[in-house]
Amino acid sequence: MNSKNKLKIINDPIYGFITIPNPLLFRLIEHPYFQRLRRISQMGMSYLVYPGAHHTRFHHALGAMFLMQRAVQVLRLKGVVISDAEEEALCIAILLHDIGHGPFSHAMEHSIVEKVSHEHISLLFMEELNREFNNRLTLAITLFKDEYPRKFFHQLISGQLDMDRLDYLRRDSFYTGVQEGTVNSQRLITMLNVHNDTLVVEEKGIYSVEKFIIARRFMYWQVYLHKTGIVAEQLLMNLLKRAKELTQSGQTLPASKALSFFLNNSIDKGNFEKETLMVFSQLDDYDIVSAMKSWSELDDFVLSNLSEMLLNRNLLKIKMKEEPFSKDQIAERRESFREKYQLTVEEANYFVFDGKIENLAYRMDKDAIYLLKKNGKLVDVASASDQLNLKALSKTVVKYYLCYPKPNY
């Protein structure tokens, strides 16, 4: 008998004690695939902006599971019938929803693998775990894929007011110290209900929903889309792209076995098979940091300088505005840097580049948040709000950026 199963409670800095509800969930948490999330940062390179932001996907997944338990409890008290099997499936689905994240959360899916989202990899992990656990995850996978008849279950897992968002906003706010992002997750959960198979919020919860939407907007502008964070993430993606370019041209770079596999092979959705998944399960933030320390000493100008920039937070400068930068502006800065260090245009592109960011706090066109009025009618929260113009927050705000080396670099 495994004595480890005696451990059923985890102390979380956000919610206090989190109880692991049954042996299956405990065994999933103990599994190496899930334990890897201890080594995957929740917020990528944001710790270069907010020094406290060193929390992991492991923290977040457990917090989301805790909130799911509370949501089921609340809905049952309001007469919503949820079986024990459905509850377990909900907890499994939300626990594993981020298990497919790669090193530093998002950087890998835009660099050394080609258009393979973390959601797709999460599903592959869940299917592999399902085989290992004798098909006990089948219902959870059905919910995760939104193939279950009771559609509000998927809204709890992936929607505009899901347990994922309710946890990460509060957790990221706590670890960054950005108080504007604080949301009362459990207050919002107590306001949830189900009407015609749709997850809704009771009318008296309107102010909590408003606070949630505003907090999400603040967190995107102040944290997730912080300009220094954008520079760091783009540099990390460029670093991995350069490493892959050099490796596939025949150079051998110092790297872990798992990282070397992805540098040496072209991986896309079509060939991301079980063998690839097993290698991916060995890859985490530590592989990248260790590689950067070695790469910073190499002769390749691009790889060594990108590594040094990230290791020592000597980042590029970034300018932002509401209109795209002209091709002449970009070309001028690129040519100046290229001439200074006698680089090719392709090499200079790693240090001078443009892009855009988008912020959409609330979507009215898909999976809107509905308020349940006392007369039984549903109304979109953006239409019902009398305190703030939430409709304005349903419009995508786009900003353009240009990154380039600092004058003294």
Image (tube, rainbow, N blue to C red):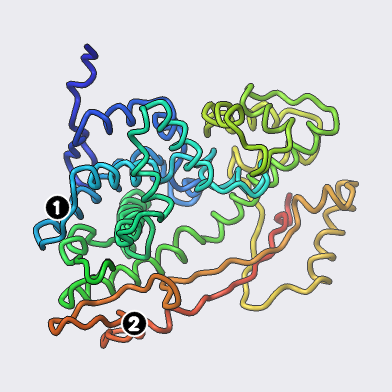
Q: Position of residue 188 (x, y in %)?
A: 21, 64
Identify which residue, 331 or 260, lies in the foreground: 260
The residue tagged 1 is: 73
Q: Quadrant of the N terminus?
A: top left
> Looking at the rendering, which quadrant does residue 404 occupy?
bottom right
Instruction: Say if residue 177 shows up in the picture.
Output: no
Q: Residue furthest front?
A: 149
Please tell me how crowded label 2 is: few (under 14), some (14-19), or many (20+) other residues with Cα within 10 Å.
Answer: many
**Is residue 271 placed above or below 134 in the rendered structure?**
below
Q: Is residue 268 left or right of residue 136?
A: right
What residue is at 33 percent from the left and 34 percent from the top?
136
Residue 322 makes an appearance in the image: yes
Label count reads 2
Please say if 409 is above or below 57: below
Quick one: label 2 or label 1, which is nearer the N terminus?
1
Q: Which mark is residue 372?
A: none
Q: Position of residue 3 (x, y in %)?
A: 21, 14
Please name the residue that numbered disc 2 is placed on. Answer: 382
Query: How far separated are the C-alphas under marks 2 and 1?
Result: 27 Å
Q: Residue at x 43, y 50 (%)?
A: 50
Horizontal arrangement in the rendering, residue 192 relative to residue 307 (left or right): left
Of 383 and 298, which appears nearest the observer?
Answer: 383
Instruction: Please tell me whether mark 2 sits on a helix, a strand or a loop.
Output: helix
Q: Is residue 118 left or right of residue 293?
A: left
Q: Is residue 311 above or below residue 181?
A: above
Horizontal and vertical percent position of residue 296: 70, 32
Q: Position of residue 287 (x, y in %)?
A: 57, 29
* Residue 352, image quadrant: bottom right
User: SS of the residue at dot 1?
Assistant: helix
